[in-house]
Image (cartoon, rainbow, N blue to C red):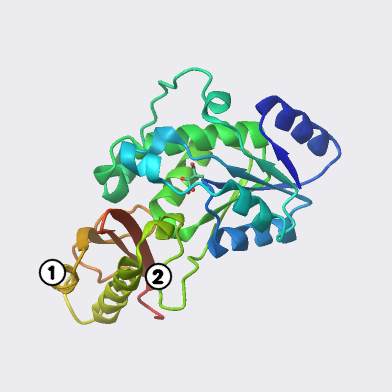
Amino acid sequence: MEVIEQVSTLRAIVTALRCGGKRIGFVPTMGALHEGHLQLLRASARENDVTICSVFVNPTQFNNASDYNLYPRTLEQDISLLQTVSCDYLFAPNAEEVYPQQSVLQFSFGALEAVMEGAHRPGHFNGVATIVSKLFHIVQPHKAYFGQKDLQQVAIVRQLVQTLSFDLELVCHPTVREADGLAMSSRNKRLNATQRQLAPQLYKALKMAKRDLQQKSVTAIKSEVAHYLTQVDELELEYFEIVDPLTLQPLHDVSGQEEVALCIAAFVGEVRLIDNMVVNLKED
Ligand code: PAF
């Protein structure tokens, strides 16, 4: 695997690959890689001729300086992991390389970003859209892989790809979980031992909500989840929403819906975690 730090170097490689008819799979990450990322990388290696991964902790998508500063950075370990999954190129630029001048670009995703992560993390999706657009232009992938844990991010990137006519296929892979149900996330590395034990309560709350979807009202389920989580020490619920999985707009009644998404965000200590579950009401 070749590690590349310069945009110009990667551009030259991508041009040669595309001229040679190679299909490029791309997995954008912020590093601190875990099994969830590795599954995306394995899928890319299976489905493309060449796989490129990026590791870049993107400053413009953090609305909180301490979250940015404390975000885990484990490049050496990431390189070792990437070597186990047939990754061909790692793009690991520094911030000056990606942002030679400050970006003032503004994206608007309308209703899609007015809820959940967009509402609680102002500017977050503007930063995500900026970096993802830049990376798509540099890497020019045929397929780009994202995890369902960031459901709203996937919806935003889908809208970005459609609106800006990026010529690529977006692939969304199911969330990968630890044995106790905790969704894999780079931020889990910041949990202390006690918090790590408490964190799977988010998944338990989602399962409880799923169980009650056919019997109880949306309001009743939301207050049940809130009540359940107030009993967990060190855990502070930020939101729990039942939404349409495509528009991500909150639902007040699930009857008539084929599918719903249950979405949750909570602080476990200082660490903010998100999770979601898409439920097919006709089958599940
Ligand atoms: O999901 C992430 O890790 C990041 O938001 C992404 C897509 C790599 C953009 O920085």
Q: Label 2, secondary structure: give it.
A: loop
Residue 81 pos. (x, y %): 65, 58
Quarter of the C terminus within the rendering: bottom left
Disc 1 beta carbon < 8 A from ligand 1? no
| Residues packed near mark 1 inside 10 Å, few (<14), some (14 to 19) or many (20 plus) | few
The residues tagged by marks 1 and 2 sit, at their Cα atoms, a distance apart of 22 Å
Q: Is residue 30 left or right of residue 63?
A: right
Relative depth, front residue between 163 and 66 = 66
Dot 1: element = helix
- Mark 1 or mark 2, earlier in chain: 2
Q: Residue at x 47, y 71 (%)?
A: 177
**Crowd class of label 2 (few under 14; some 14 to 19; many from 20; radius 10 Å):** many
Q: Which residue is mark 2?
A: 182
Q: Residue at x 34, y 44 (%)?
A: 67
- Amino acid type at circle 2 is Leu
Where on the picture, by quarter, is residue 62? top left
Name the residue furthest top: 101
Viewed as shown, does residue 269 lie left or right of 128? left
Q: How many callouts does the rendering have?
A: 2
Horizontal and vertical percent position of residue 90 = 68, 43
- Is residue 267 at least partly visible in the picture? yes
Can you give x and y, in whole percent of width and height, for residue 57 in the image?
A: 49, 40
* Quadrant of res 185: bottom left
> Residue 29: percent from the left, percent from the top?
54, 47
Whether residue 114 can be seen here: no
Q: Is 12 located above or below residue 115 in the figure?
A: above
Name the residue nearer the viewer: 44 or 185.
185
Question: Which label was assigned to residue 63?
Answer: none
Amino acid type assigned to the residue bearing label 1 in the image = Ser
- Checking the image for residue 223, the label placed there is 1
Furthest residue toward right? 20
- Which callout, 1 or 2, points to the residue nearer the camera? 2
